[in-house]
Amino acid sequence: MSLTRRDFLKYSAVTAAGASGMPVFQSAMAMGKKREKVVSYVPTFCEICFWNCGAIAKVEDGKVVKLDGNAASPTSRGKLCARGNAGMGSLYDPDRLKHPMLNTGKRGEPKWKKVSWDEALGFIAGKMNKIKETYGPEAVAMISHGTGDSFWRYLFKAYGSPNTAAPSFAQCRGPRDIGYLLTFGDGPGSPEQIDMAKSKFIVLIGSHLGENAHNSQVQDFVEGIAKGAKLAVVDPRFSTAAGKATWWLPIKPGTDMALLLAWINIIVNEELYDKEYINKYAIGLKELKKEIKFYTPEWAAKETEISANTIVETAKEMARYKPSVVIHPGRHTTWYGDDTQRARAMAILTALLGSWGREGGYFFPTKASGFPKYPGLPEMSEPQKSKLSGDWPYALNATTTAVRIATITGKPYPVKGWIAYGCNIMKAIPNQKETIEAIKNLDLMVAVDILPFEYTQWADVVLPECTYLERYDDLKVGRGKTLSVTIRQPVVQPMYESKPSWWITRELGVKMGLEAYFPWTDIEDYLKKRLEPKGVRLEDLKVKGTISYPETSAPFITAHNKPEFDTPSGKIELYSKQLKEKGFDPVPKYKKHDAPTEGQFRLLYGRSPVHTFSRTVNNQWLLELYKENELWLNANRAKAMGLKNGEYVVLINQDGVKSNKIKLKVTERIREDCVYMVHGFGHNSKDTKKAFGKGVDDQSLITRYAIDPLMGGTGMRVNFVKILRGA
Amino acid sequence: MPRYGMVIDQKRCIGCMACVVACKRENDVPEEHYRTRVVEMVEGTFPKLRMELRPELCNHCENAPCVYNCPTGASYKSKDGIVLVDNKKCVGCKACMAACPYDARFVDPRNGAAHKCTLCEHLIKDGKEPACVTTCISKARIFGDFNDPQSPVSRILAERHVRTLIPEAGTKPAVYYIGLELLT
């Protein structure tokens, strides 16, 4: 028997009416009638990636049904990417961490016991206080990613440990931030302070914008191209961006520095640089000229396998459009170990083109301040600089690399506790064996996340955080062209027993006797006090989502807006005396990197526009769009090896590490000497059921890394793989 | 009467798939099915390559074969030129799917009826744009009324070279493309 919807309604009405004694007819009418849904629209900002786009959630009867961009937000401008559109996939993921858990088994082979928040936090507080007594507070380190980490960083300050590290530095942006800092006295910013919508010439070096869907930046990029900007894409792979390019330069991997130095050589020697700008704002042109004289286009052509003609043509073209040129600084720049120097070369090129502080080039972020810290906080007990910066003078703070070394070796001092927040360290940091070795030395390992990713399996305690749609966080203070402030607020009530970080850190702080550092009564009190000095009412911000201050904008050099360079000389440093004094090359030099041998390919990796690292692979709305990563293999090489598109293969790296099976994408879109895959797949935590076992974990093959001696970054494009058939 | 439709600028499309997800969430499209997609086409051999990224959806044709071939009258055209399906009349015979040259339809496994793009007519009624257009990061999708000479789509048709997909089918689509070159 099949029931129609109408029949079903009648039937259920009869049953219900029978129980309540109400007249059947009326009840059936009432139930058959469509009830008006309660709909609300709540602004917040996205956390599916770090771009943190302002979003508006449509909530229907207490359920998030749609997410849209907030037009007031500088990072979304009313639009969301695929991932932002799929944000509710995290919220309603059935695999979510639902309650605090203690591991009664072994690390890596956990047996979970559900515990109360009180017990979980009591356990952590006890262990942290004991570590502090025995080894000092610096023996607890944090590795984190995401907006919620601001409260965790604060807790660490209160506790007294300076050791808060993030893969976003040593495994990602660090080299380029330092390279630009050394040259201009300031980093390129995040979001990058680039004015691509008005650029006339854009250069991407390994950056695959579009595949890497940084919302407002992609908007600007497309706008620039649509208005006629020329585009040079330097990439061994024909990326989506390369598909839009005027010049695709399929460079031999590992030789980007040769191309940059040749471009500098041409622009300096042919006097194509912005003379007035350089005379006024830069030092070291003479030394630069001397250092780069060897790097001719003919020499670079041999290294890069890009013709000398193309090198000359692109150099002349970019000079023609100066200063409205963006040499994109890149983002994930930990490639070969000399990455800070490569970023220096990019910064020097930017300076020669006069693009720093110019329309269509780099803009200055607003200098306006506002939204100071919560007032009247006690002095922090945090000691000075972290010693976990290795011997790398520009590590600035603790790095993940040094935290791991200290945990393994006990040098320069023991590290006995880790708190990993929102960061799947198994996928983010190279050489997983080393990470496991470090974890085995710990007295305490805590994981805080929304999903049971790999690293949570190595924890003693797992704390379930709310997703971004269920929580308040600290204010998002934007320093782009204009100052802005954006709120994150709960769109729906937290599911399960999940809690926001502001609550978790405060409770943990109180349990460790640090209540003086947490004087706020609740998060709204905290936010109100931070908004007060600027005269912003929390109630208004909760309605608008973002408030911007356009009057704070001064993006370009004018007669009244003189640039400031926070370098030792107060000028742009084409030649870096401070590098020279520390024993490094004052002008970047070319160094040959190892190349793959016969039968090997260099392993390259990157992004899919529908995934953020490894963290969205379990999101059903995104997984269905890209279910497993594929291995891009050059069509000629595939033919010679008898390999077919769609076939599954296994990879083995130079250290004998074998991968799971991966599907081949045989394509003309990549050079013969490298293979490529999207990062973040190959999940081996069975508790992330949808992601489990799909594709290959690039990081499992990245057993080798090249440390950047300037800042401790781990260059990860130094691994070679062979393809094994018959998977 | 309006004649709603879209112009798609392939030169702007960056293949981010925001439109695909926005469509699915706005319209509760069943798992593994899509009302819109982005097709990636590459031509040439290394290193001389060309690529087009083509967002595709129902073309809301003036001469809509899906409507003519529907035996029950479930597929119909609204007064605004939008091709729609009346679920109550649909028997799931798939004649429309066979007739559509654009592969723009599927059967919804939840109710057995043909399912397709509605141009988000529920949003248009409220003065909004279709979800794929609103979210399009690269502004590659432009929505409007072709019967209004002032609308952005009419102006593009007047000023730029546009093409339609499979014009030889004689369907007279309401979806036009800028930068359509690789006709595979």
Image: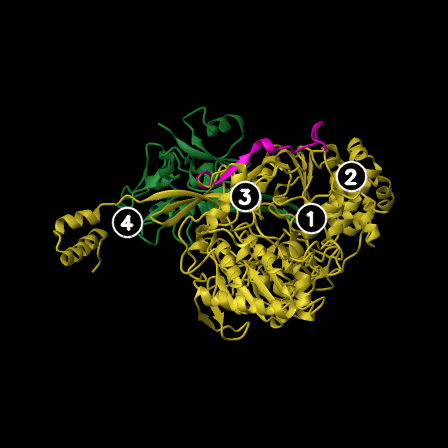
Chain colours: A yellow, B green
> Eyeballing the image, is A441 above or below A403?
below
Could you say which is closer to the camera, residue A431 or residue A638? Answer: A431
Residue B184 in sight: no
Q: Secondary structure at mark 4?
A: loop
Q: Which residue is mark 2?
A: A571
Kind of residue indicated by mark 3:
Leu
Foreground disc of the pair 1, 4 = 1
Q: Specify start and end residues of the magenta stretch as a single range.
A: A540-562
Looking at the image, residue A34 sits to the left or right of residue A444; the answer is left
Point out which mark residue A177 bears.
Answer: 1
Judge whether residue A558 is colored magenta: yes
Foreground disc of the pair 3, 2 = 2
The subunit carrying tag 1 is: A
Splitting the image into 4 quarters, where does residue A414 fall?
bottom right
The disc, 1 or 2, on the residue closer to the chain's N-terminal end is 1
Q: CA distance from mark 1 to mark 2?
A: 17 Å
Q: Which residue is mark 3?
A: B53
Judge whether residue A596 is colored magenta: no
Kind of residue indicated by mark 4:
Val
Kind of residue indicated by mark 2:
Lys
Point out which mark residue A310 bears.
Answer: none
Q: Secondary structure at mark 3?
A: strand
Q: Which residue is mark 4?
A: B91
* Residue A559 position in % (x across, y down): 72, 27
Q: Secondary structure at mark 1?
A: helix
* Residue B26 position in % (x across, y down): 40, 45
Is disc 3 in contact with disc 2, using a CB cutoff of under 8 Å?
no
The subunit carrying tag 2 is: A
The subunit carrying tag 3 is: B
Q: CA distance from mark 1 to mark 4?
A: 61 Å
Looking at the image, residue A525 sits to the left or right of residue A210; the answer is left
Is disc 3 in contact with disc 4, using a CB cutoff of under 8 Å?
no
